[in-house]
Structure formats: C-alpha cells, structure tokens
Amino acid sequence: MTDAKDKGKEYLQGSERQTSRSYSPAVITRGGRTVYLAGHGGYRDESGKTHPGDFDAQVRICFERMRSVLESVGGTLNDIVSMTVFIVNMENGDRFTELRKEFFPEGRYPGSALIGIKELAHPEMMLEIQAIAVIS
C-alpha cells in the first residue's frame, strides 16, 4: 500500500511507530539517477565555527550539507530514499527523529537506520549521516 507518490517514488505507509520516528518502511523508485551521498557530519559549519555538544546544530548542519550536495546535481532532500544515521549517544535518537521531520514532508520520509556507535572521525562529532537519493 502506498501512502504518497512523488516524482517516480512510492512511500509505503508506515506503522504508527514508524511514522512517529519519521521514516518509511520502504521507498520504491522507478527510473532516475541514483546519488550516493558520503557521510556528512556537522560539528563544524561552513563558516568554520564548531558546535561541540550542540546536537540540534549538528543535525541541521548535516542536512544543510546534504541539501547543498544534492542541489549541485539537480536534486533536493526530498530525493533521499534511504539514510543511515550513525549516532554517538543513543539518548539523542528521539531528538534526531523529531529534527528530521523539519526536512521532509509528512509521509514522505526516507527509509532509515539509526545506529549507535562508540565514536566518529572527530571527537566533537555527535552524528554522521550517509544517504542514497534518486533524482527523477
């Protein structure tokens, strides 16, 4: 069953929990170009300012970086069909899912995994997001 269709993508309707956690159980695509986004962290913004300990800022910087990369190849965040989120402190998991809702329309969430890990490339990094987008 599909919940929403968007430029060659079908988003399977999620359970109440999946919807509350802002992810789809599956996204089906037809055609388009596939873009594999490298991992994006957000401990340092584009001006060079660091955000140690500021989880919300780091999440927003990650999404803005992904938005910028996708725009450079003719896409948008709405083209993301899958993401893997690596998070240092799982206590921030609920907050991440709330913040993700700022970046995707209701019912058009990418498939996602949220994985707790010990550390990332820089000690200040609180999360890293890797994603796959399909641009129709």
Image (spheres, rainbow, N blue to C red):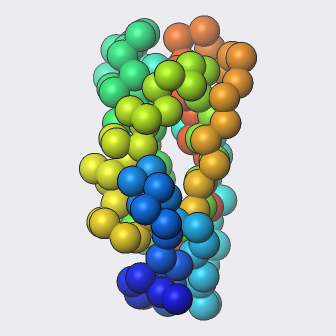
Which residue occupies the foreground of this view, 87 or 74? Answer: 87
Q: Residue furthest front?
A: 16
Whether 124 is drawn above or below 96: the answer is: above
Q: Can residue 25 be seen in this view?
A: yes
Relative horizontal placement of residue 68, taking residue 14 as reference (left or right)? left
Residue at 62% across / 14% down in the picture?
122
Which residue occupies the foreground of this view, 119 or 48? Answer: 119
Relative horizontal placement of residue 76, taking residue 32 as reference (left or right)? left
Question: For residue 30, which quarter of the picture?
Answer: bottom right
Q: Position of residue 41 (x, y in %)?
A: 53, 31
Q: Position of residue 67 (x, y in %)?
A: 40, 53
Whether 38 is drawn above or below 80: the answer is: above
Total numbered labels placed on residues in the image: 0
Residue at 60% across / 82% down in the picture?
28
Which residue occupies the foreground of this view, 77 or 102? Answer: 102
Q: Residue furthest right?
A: 118
Q: Position of residue 93 (x, y in %)?
A: 49, 33
Relative horizontal placement of residue 26, taking residue 109 as reference (left or right)? right
Q: Is residue 133 visible?
A: no
Residue at 43% across / 62% down in the picture?
16
Residue at 43% across / 35% down in the picture?
94
Q: Where is residue 59 in the image (x, y as percent from the top left)?
A: 41, 33
Whether 43 is drawn above or below 24: the answer is: above
